[in-house]
Amino acid sequence: MLTFRDISIENKFKIVILFTSGTILLLASVAFVVSDLITFRTTMTDDMFTLADLVGINSTAGLIFRNSRTTKENIAALKANSHITLAHIFSKKGKIFASYFREEANSDSTHSEPSSLTLYNYYSLHKSNATKKDIEDSYFFHEGYLKIFKKIFYKGKWVGTVFIQSDLDALNARLLWAGGIVITILLMSLGLAFILASRLQQFITTPIYSLLNTMKTVSKDKNYSIRGKKQSNDELGRLIEGFNEMLRQIEIRDKDLDQANKNISNAMEDLKTTQQELVQSEKMAALGQLVAGIAHEINTPLGAIRASIGNIKKGLTESIEQLPIVFKRLPEERQKDFFALVTQATRTTNISSREERKAKRKLIAFLKENEIERADSIGNTLINMGVYENIEPYMVLFQVEDALSTLKVAHNIARQQKNSNNIELAIEKASKIVFSLKSYAHVEHSHEMTESNIVENLEVVLTLYHNQIKQGIEVIKNYQQVPTIACYPDELNQVWVNLIHNAMHAMNNQGTLEIDVSQKEPHIVIKIIDSGHGISDEVRNRIFEPFFTTKPRGEGSGLGLDIVKKVITKHRGSIEVESQPGRTVFTILLPVIAPNKAVVSDNDT
């Protein structure tokens, strides 16, 4: 399943632009609708108060002369407003003097009628226990209606009260109208934004795709003379310039190495292979410089690679300069001896310093017995080459003109193999670290459990902590053969990181860390044991509480073991801790469940 980070950069630009535009438009639209509805509600309320004023003025005479018939005829004019469902004219004493009901009004329009039809009971629906003094001009939005209370005055004296109830159909219609406009504008704007994004993103994606195509062509055809096309002077343009410069340097090195290989006979096939590996290693070192600051552990193998490359470069340069001269003065038979000596030097193994000194004395003595000139220097060179014995076939070679220079050329060629081995070991170490870092940093967005190997996950975490561990921690691994389990690997990796980090902290990075993995049906049992100062009973009872920590301020959030507990619980497992000074054991039990049986409840998530 593709995640956002995995989709093409072209689609990412479109999604970002559409999401940003849509969010801004949506917020603006909501503000518009809310503002419009508030304004409409205010206008609607003001209109209803104006209407109540008119009704009150027309009803004043009827109230004064107690002519309810005339008053009813006056308020009957309210039927001109189809939204008025109910109106009452209350006398000064609070009793209904005249009423109006919308002709088609049903029981819903009067469902809020009080049991006793008086002004005070009506008002009490909105203000509890209202009295004569509490009655005032007011309005209420209640149960889908707008209700207005408006006092009627004649010559400054209160003679009655108007009550008008209106439905909210106009307000609802306004809401639908505003919503329709907002949706229409939003869809049109998003469509226009999509069209513009599709066209404008080409200014960014075109140089990137061009660079990708160049990289694929170079990788496929191994043709380093190809160059990326620079289309601008921005960061993308500088990236393409850097890429082209890297290709130029690789091309130059390729040509130099190819020329050097052509000067060596077919009998040097092994050296040719080493040189090709050197080219690849240099390319990796160049790329490695881009991430040289990721971790100290990566710097160490990169340093070894750089040192070996320097030695190879120096050796090749000297060999290329001296080989024609050496071959010119050596007869054909001696040339065979020369290559045989180089081959023997590349197949030797390292010996101790004591054995080397003993072999050196014996070798020089043998050379002097055979009256070889400059026996000491030749002996030292042979020892440096790793040739400690069986030099009888090369005695004639040691007697040729300038034999020492010839041996130095042979030494330069032979030591390329050792430098290549150093490069190979360094690359293997760096690859393991990078793989572990990649495995740990991976985020699984699937909500389903997957099969995973607990031992492999533990090894990933140990590799990440290798630099701290090697400073003074002895790791003891007791791994039994256990099956893969259904789990969330990323979350379990966080468990191992927290527990191993806490164990190292408890030991002050000095002590023994023991990790046991075994199977006890129906669980896999993982034990992480450290030789730290231990956990007191008081602290042990609280270590899984959120925000509880014994570390100094700023060094711990107190959430590490809380997260561990929740992750283990989510996996239907359990965690226990036993501690005493010098030995703390965290025991985790995880069930062995097939992936198709692993179900996560709502509580787990």
Image (cartoon, rainbow, N blue to C red):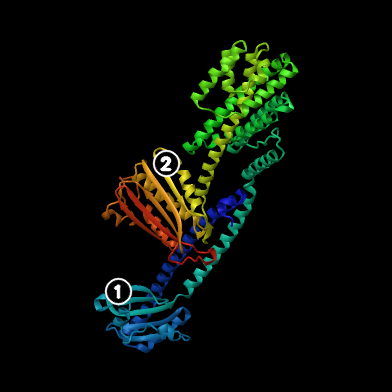
Q: Residue at x 40, y 77 (%)?
A: 143
Q: CA distance from mark 2 to mark 1?
A: 80 Å
Of the pair 438 and 383, the residue shown nearer to us: 383
Question: Which percent across, then down, holds residue 318?
Answer: 63, 19
Q: Amino acid at mark 2?
A: Ile
Give x and y (percent) for residue 263: 72, 23
Q: Quadrant of residue 188?
A: bottom right
**Where is the C terminus found, in terms of image quarters?**
bottom left
Q: Quadrant of the N terminus?
A: bottom right
Element marked by disc 1: loop
Q: Residue at x 57, y 28 (%)?
A: 308
Which amino acid does the dot numbered 1 rest on?
Glu
Q: Residue at x 32, y 83 (%)?
A: 90
Q: Position of residue 12 (x, y in %)?
A: 58, 51
- Residue indicated by mark 1: 136
Q: Nearer the viewer, residue 374 or 541?
A: 374
Looking at this view, is 104 or 575 the one in front?
575
The local crowd at label 2, few if under 14, some if 14 to 19, many if 20 or more residues have their Cα within 10 Å, is some
Query: Is the residue 345 above or below the residue 593 in the image?
Result: above
As helix, strand or loop, the secondary structure at mark 2 comes to helix
Residue 191's mark? none
Vertically, is 327 above or below 70? above
Between 138 and 484, the one lying in front of the other is 484
Residue at the right extreme of this rendering: 332
Sequence-first tag of 2 and 1: 1
Q: Is residue 106 left or right of residue 214?
A: left
- Residue 446 at least partly seen: no
The residue that label 2 is drawn on is 469
Q: Are marks 2 and 1 in contact (CB under 8 Å)?
A: no
Of marks 2 and 1, the one in the foreground: 2
